[in-house]
Each structure stands twice: as C-alpha cells, then as structure tokens.
Image (cartoon, grey):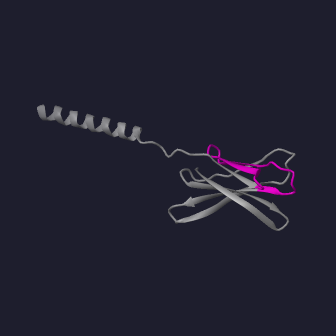
Amino acid sequence: MLRRIASLFAATVLAVVTSVTVAASPAMAGANAMAWTYAGGTARGQAVWYHDGDGLKVCDMSADGRGIRGVIYSYNSAGGYWVNEFSVADSNSSDGCKTGSMNVPDGRKVEVVVYQYWSDSTCCAESSYGVA
C-alpha cells in the first residue's frame, strides 16, 4: 500500500513539473523592424515590418522624383540561406503609404531593407532586423 501511494505521489509530481515546465517555456516572440533611407541628410522614406500579420508598410516622404521600395528577407536557418519574401513600393509621396503582406514562417529572423529608386538607379539602402 505504501508503495502504491509513493508511486502515485511520484506520478503526480512528475505531471505537475512537466505541465509547469511546458507552460513556462516562452514562445518565440515576434519583433517589428523599421528602416529609414536618407539623401542629403534628409529622411526620404521608410519601411516598417509588422510581425503581427506579416505586413510591410512603405512610405515615400519626399517629392523628389524617387520612389521608395521595402523588401522583406527571412533567414531559413534549416537551409542556412536568406529568402526574398516580398516587396512593396511607394512611388508618390502625396498619396499615402503603401502596404503589403505575405505569410513568413513564425520565428524566422527577418531583415527589412529600404532604398530609393528612379529610372534604372537605386541608392541609399538601409536595413533593420526583426522576427516573424
């Protein structure tokens, strides 16, 4: 009888410890990221990654004839390479920001890159990191 009680007690303790350990394990939290592109010391545009919804907002902030493009890359750690997920472009500073989204696997490191473009030229790329 004493053995049965001890066995039951040990099983109960194991179940409680296991459930507390599983409940206490933090989930991989996402993180937003924001990058700005400048020219002549003035901010010309920005790209913002929102991990909740996997969204990208790109804003052209200067009527200078240049557009702003934001690109989302995610790091596939299993394969050891970066994946070009999607991009959003805003070519007009007077019509508000442009947005887009695409599912990026949760927990992946994400790089948001923003740059200016016009004709066949680009410049002033900047980047920031977040987590999907």
Q: Is residue 109 visible?
A: yes
Outermost residue, front side: 41
Toward which corner of the image does residue 14 lie, by quadrant? top left
Residue nearest the viewer, comparing 130 with 26: 130
Q: Considering the image in quadrants, where does the N terminus appear?
A: top left
The residue at 56%/54% (across/down) is 109
* 116 displayed left or right of 51: right
Find out whether residue 58 is within the magenta segment.
yes
Residue 94 position, x and y percent, is 87, 46
Dominant secondary-structure state across the stretch colored magenta? strand
Residue numbers of the magenta segment: 39-68
The answer to whether 96 appears left or right of 115 in the picture is right
22 up-or-down from 124: above or below: above
Residue 130 percent across, percent down from the top left: 59, 50
Q: How many marks?
A: 0
Image: 81 above or below 54: below
At 33% from the left and 40% from the top, the residue drawn is 18
Q: Give the percent coordinates (x, y) of residue 47.
A: 71, 50
Residue at position x 22%, y 36% in the image: 10
Does the rendering let one see residue 1?
no
**Dividing the picture into quarters, in which one does residue 110 lie?**
bottom right
Task: Out of 59 and 28, give the one closest to the viewer.
Answer: 59
